[in-house]
Image (spheres, rainbow, N blue to C red):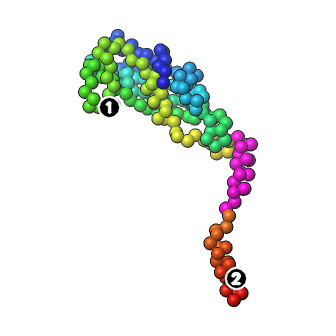
Amino acid sequence: MEALAEHTIAFSGLKDGTHDFDFMLGADFFAATGEEELEGGAVQMQVRLDKSTTLLVVSMHAEGAVDVRCDRCNTPMQQPVDGEQRQIFRLTGEDDHEDEELVTLDASAHSVNLTHYFYECIRLALPIRHVHPEGQCDPEVERALQALSLDHEPTPDPRWAVLKELQNKERNS
Ligand SMILES: [Zn+2]
């Protein structure tokens, strides 16, 4: 996704140790994801950055709600999200490809942008299927769905028909 400037952390001026940041993700963020499915939302992203001379450990905690469509009635709903994700950045500039969890930053980098990692964190926290809580779907759609399921009453097992026919034959013979 598109990186948003407000999610860039300039780490070169920070002392070694932990630093806390708070980001509020709203309409701009969800528009930048380019995913039509994510119509909006309000998610608080708490970031703890642990800096050492060689590594940046970024711990993220996402909490809030994302505006999506209900998979059952297709009307808007808010899907609560609560998730955690960690990303480690190596600052030495040497990429030995040994650990996929590590992202190596250019040795001359002074800052890191986290938009993409926020997106990953929220995506992982979102359930695959989102449905209104029981009884809160659009009542009109609910009625239509019920009517549909009545139309599709299970037809009797065809084996019974065969059996009946056999019985009739026996009786008639
Ligand atoms: Zn629904």
Main SS category, magenta section: helix
Image coordinates for residue 57, horizontal then vertical, percent? 34, 24
The verdict on residue 58 being magenta is no
Tell me which segment is drawn in magenta.
138-154
Q: Which residue is identified by label 1?
A: 100
Q: CA distance from mark 1 to mark 2?
A: 71 Å
Image coordinates for residue 21, horizontal then vertical, percent? 44, 19
**32 versus 84 height, above or below:** above
Q: Which mark is residue 116?
A: none
Quadrant assignment, res 114: top left
Quadrant assignment, res 8: top left
41 or 93: nearer the viewer: 93
Q: Which mark is residue 168?
A: 2
Give the side of residue 172 with respect to residue 131, left or right.
right
Identified at 49% across, 17% down, the residue is 4
**12 versus 160 height, above or below:** above
